[in-house]
Image: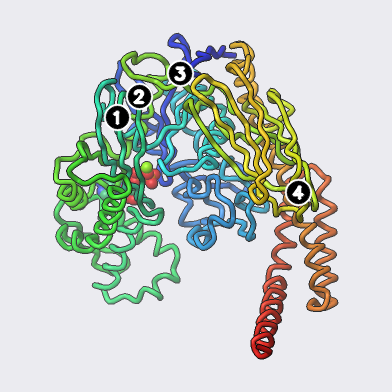
Amino acid sequence: MAKISINLKDGTAKKEDTLIVGIDLGTTNSLVAYMLDNKPVAVKGQDNTNTLVPSIIHFLPNGKKLVGDDAKAKLIDDPANTIYSVKRLMGKSYKDLSSHSEYLGYEVIDDDTESLVKIRVNDIFYTPVELSANILTALKLRVEKELNQIVSKAVITVPAYFNDAQRQATRDAGKLAGLDVLRIVNEPTAASLAYGLGQKADSSNLIAVYDLGGGTFDISILQIQDGIFEVLSTNGDTFLGGDDIDRLLMDYWLKINGRDKQDFIKEKKKLQELRLLAEKAKKVLSSNLLFKESFDGMNCQIAREVFDNLISPLVSRTLDSCKIALNDAGKTVKDIQHVVMVGGSTRVPYIKKSVSQFFDQPLYDSLDPDEVVALGAAIQADILAGNQKEMLLLDITPLSLGIETVGGLMDAIIPRNSKVPSRAARQYTTSVDGQVNLKVAVYQGERDQIADNRRLGEFVLKGIPPMPAGLPKIEIIFAIDADGILKVTAKELRSGVEQEIEIKSQYGISEEDMARMLMDSITNAEADLKVRSLLEARNEANNVLLSTQKFLQQNDQILSGEEKKTTLALANALKATVDGANKDLINKAMADLNEYTAPIAHRAMDVHVANAMRGTKLGEKEE
Ligand code: ADP
Ligand code: MG
């Protein structure tokens, strides 16, 4: 086993250590890059041409998986077992997704709850973390094959707007793929690094990064000062990208050929084929003035000029976002010194022209826009490996810091490698009615269960006013000062009751211990995830059972005998699975119960609302 040596102060790996790769884990495409002779290169696949791995996973009937181009080919024939756009689901709860799940061709379990989403394929439930890990594993294998050596360390990029949960999910995916994720880097920061911006310690720069990918648009305004990148603002549209251009083109062809869209949509396969033809035409038009082919008796022709007109409203929308981002950063176009183009869709000449006009300057577009983020990630990895001395690095936390939550799970509040000083807060609540005390136990480490991490201290927040479970709002704040002293504060926000502890001095942990803890977290990632998803499924099931019980009690008058009987039977079936060790059975039983009770709950709600309204009306009359 490779030995990890980590600089305790900044959490970076030593130079003599093994290679660190850079990974762009994209919504549409992913890729991996590394430094070769001081230059970043993206790794090609077996065909030796394409560096992009489509971010798609297909499940074969025998349970095996296909990832990348092979999986993409299955999108047409077998969409239910072919998962794409997983990145959209990372760190998201069902509630966060709400209306967007219908956009996906596979099944997202969409109970209206706050727990994290799962995806169902053949009655097996997968988390976005597991699915992303499949993509990362494919990339890991790809670079290992190219270099003929084991690769176990990586820098992974995420959008600048990713929140803590989404970043943590990305880290977990890396861990599950057997990668020690040394740092999560913002995509626009990586892209700027690829162009060598901000490499000099003494320069100050203002950069706009325009990223138009397959399904998302992001604009980020970055400031680099003394080698430190700061995101001043971000804006964009999570449902705007190259896919929309393809759709516009399809609609155009259907129209000029007098075809009815509704009729065409019924033939799923043909529709997909036309979509692929539209994508092809779009790419051809990036270097030619005309595209002409026929398909299904249609004349599929389009000239560059017509195409430009077609996409002009879409481009305007991206520029509106740019205006907002500039405004939010308190800057104007004149302040921007560099404009970096990212994402496959920025190859479209009309888009380049429009963006250049908007910012009134030439663009950084000489690098491959699909690869630029991964290339920058490889440079960042190289800096972390200690190979680029002139680049400044911040002090960062060597291991994650967090607290114990229900079921003995670790909830990381300040992730490993966060910059110091740092401050993060998260809200919790009670799990029992009338609970007046809450134990806050602080842990350090990367494992999912606190039993495997290191306990730093604990205290009890006392004097919470008695309230029903779930009502108190308890904010836990972790603050690390520049000297590495951690202060943990807990505060009940409704009553203002507060308590804190201080934990001193780099948490007194030896370098060997830290290396061991990290290594453990990687070798045990898969087992950890299994335990974690089982514990999470159990917690969720217990909550569902409790609320079902409450629901039955409160709506006794409204429910029919049959409904009560079936609900009880399904609840009992769920109860029977809870103590078992099979999370899929628990999830299945939970889905069954939710599916059955959802319409009844809606009806009950309507009755309650109607009653309440009647109440108000009566009240008014009495006045
Ligand atoms: P993501 O960041 O979402 O993973 P990418 O940056 O890989 O996405 O961009 C993928 C998009 O770029 C797709 O919509 C694809 O059709 C588009 N694209 C790729 N090459 C070209 C080209 N030559 N001209 C126009 N669009 C292109
Ligand atoms: Mg991208």
- Quadrant where the C terminus sits is bottom right
Q: Quarter-wise, where is residue 500 in the image?
A: top right
Of discs 1 and 4, which sits in the foreground?
4
Instruction: Choose between 510 and 507: the one closer to the eye.
Output: 507
Local SS, label 4? loop
Q: Quarter-wise, where is residue 134 in the image?
A: top right
Q: Going by the image, does 439 lie left or right of 105?
A: right
Q: Residue at x 36, y 46 (%)?
A: 234
Cα distance in 3D space between marks 4 and 2: 46 Å
Query: Neighbour class for label 3 at 10 Å: few (<14), some, many (≥20)?
Result: few
Sequence order check: which comes first, mark 1 or mark 4?
A: 1
| In the image, the residue with mark 1 has its CB under 8 Å from the nearest atom of ligand 2 | no
Q: Amino acid at mark 2?
A: Ile
Cα distance in 3D space between marks 1 and 2: 7 Å
Query: Neighbour class for label 1 at 10 Å: few (<14), some, many (≥20)?
Result: many
The residue identified by callout 3 is 148
The residue identified by callout 4 is 431
Q: Amino acid at mark 1?
A: Ala
The residue identified by callout 2 is 379
Local SS, label 3? loop
Residue sitting farthest toward the front: 623
